[in-house]
Amino acid sequence: QVQLVESGGGLVQAGGSLRLSCAASGRTFSSYGRGWFRQIPGKEREFVAAISQSGISTYYADSVKGRFTVSRDNAKNTVYLQMNSLKPEDTAVYYCARKGLIGTYYRPDEYDYWGQGTQVTVSS
């Protein structure tokens, strides 16, 4: 069974930075792409960023491009989301997920395992 555990969320002022981590169990960590999504109450889960199995390819939502960076360390079974220049509209619960073997990186239903989420709050 795959388990994903996010950490690193918290409260930060606008313009500040946070780094989220997502630690995964399982020996096939490097075989799958990983994604980060976020969600606020009453809204659908929104794609933020993703990274391919090897880490060579990365994908970003337009709203975070240039501010967020996704990376992975396969030796540590961990994916990271470095978030800089944070804005109040980045406030949400952030989830990491394991992508299935087929499909795109942008849709939540292409992912088969999810973490429990970590809250990010950006104050103005």
Image (cartoon, rainbow, N blue to C red):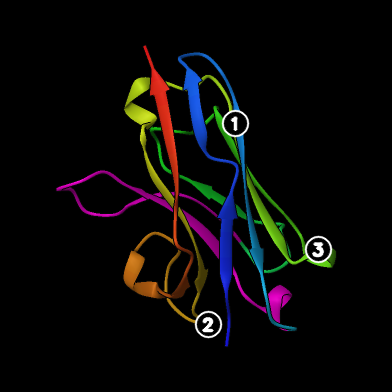
Relative horizontal placement of residue 11, taking residue 20 as reference (left or right):
left
Q: Hey, what amino acid is under mark 3?
A: Lys
Instruction: Name the residue carrying label 3.
Output: 76
Relative horizontal placement of residue 79, taking residue 84 as reference (left or right):
right
Relative horizontal placement of residue 94, taking residue 2 as reference (left or right):
left
Q: Hey, what amino acid is under mark 2?
A: Leu
> Is 31 covered by the magenta stretch?
yes
Q: Secondary structure at mark 3?
A: helix
Q: Hey, what amino acid is under mark 1?
A: Leu
Residue drawn at (45%, 33%) of the image: 64
Q: Position of residue 105 (x, y in %)?
A: 45, 63
Quarter of the C terminus within the rendering: top left
Mark 2 or 1: the one toward you: 1
Identify the magenta region. Answer: 28-51
Instruction: Name the residue carrying label 2.
Output: 101
| CA neighbours of label 2 inside 10 A, class few (<14), some (14 to 19), many (20+) | few
| CA neighbours of label 1 inside 10 A, class few (<14), some (14 to 19), many (20+) | some
